[in-house]
Amino acid sequence: MINDFNGIIEQAGAVGPKTIAVAVAQDEDVLKAVSAAHDLGIASAVLVGDKPGIESISISSGLDIRRHEIINVRDKVEACRQAVHLVRQGRASILMKGFVDTGIILKAVLDKESRLMTGSLLSHVGVLAVEGFDRFFILSDAAMNIAPTLDEKAAIIRNAVKVAHALGNPYPKVAVLCAAEETNSPVAAALDAARLVSMNQRGEVDGCIIGGPFALDIAISAQAANHECISHPVAGCADILITPNLEAGNILNKSMEYFAGARKAGIIMGAGAPIILTSRASSHRAKLNSIALSVLVADIQ
């Protein structure tokens, strides 16, 4: 089982290279990431965007982008459409956001003509490495679904489990997070957690074991779980953390990054291909980690 980003990059090199279609590629950190991925044998890229802008950034950054195909499209909406089209045609197996608003690229993905939608729910899956822990934390959903229903939470778990499987974890432990841990609580997230546990026991959400509702400390700390006399197999050793809504997921994701110094990667799951949708503020190393993760996911899709 892979438990650090060096391991992800090494394994991505073993199963790669894959081809990435980059939508609106005139972004310095994106170009640095795809160049590094090429050097490591992880991925090649087709750069869709403003060619003069791409070339100007590459020159100022000392990057050799002659190794990558460039499709000159100045309009950002059309660049997103063409990048999606490359994936649909099979010329690329991964889609990556460049210097463009998330809504624009997602609109291109969701377009019926794109044929990238599989009928599954799109959800963001973050993979974070936190110092002091011997495993990744897979966190969802921090970017897509504002207030997911019970069925949507089940789909979010399925997407996160696929990522865990791509990392070599055949049976990840899933903690459904909530402020209240009583299953008879009036808190809606606690009721959903109990129902998700039942769905897991019935085989409706498989490939994992689900526990909850758990507070965050109970999910990740064996000491905290023991102190509260909670002996569930997921308690204290969760691999996947499912948050009750987007706000909680986004705050937890950024807290882990900025307060705990977590290294991270993130992709959108649920489409016909993994989608790299990192924040513009993310470093090129975080983007490289996301590329490597998407290569592993694409290999099992």
Image (tube, rainbow, N blue to C red):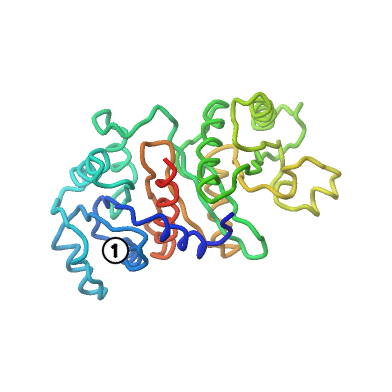
Who is closer to the viewer here, 79 or 33?
Answer: 33
Spot occupied by residue 102 in the image (x, y as percentages of width and height):
34, 45
**Residue 168: image location, x then y, percent:** 56, 50
In the shown orientation, is residue 256 left or right of residue 285? right
Residue occupied by mark 1? 31
In the rendered image, the quadrant that contains the N terminus is: bottom right
| 216 in relation to 31, above or below | above
- Total marks shown come to 1
Helix, strand or loop at label 1? It is helix
Q: Residue at x 68, y 27 (%)?
A: 201
Question: From the viewer's perspective, is 217 left or right of 103?
Answer: right
- Closer to the camera in the image, 11 or 249: 11
Rendered location of residue 126, percent (x, y): 51, 50
Where is residue 234, by image quadrant?
Answer: top right
- Residue 172's place in the image compared with 192, above or below, is below
Image quarter where the C terminus lies is top left
Which quadrant holds residue 207?
Answer: top right
Relative to 45, is 277 on the left or the right? right
Q: Residue at x 39, y 56 (%)?
A: 291
**Which residue: 36% across, 37% down?**
272
Amino acid under label 1?
Answer: Leu
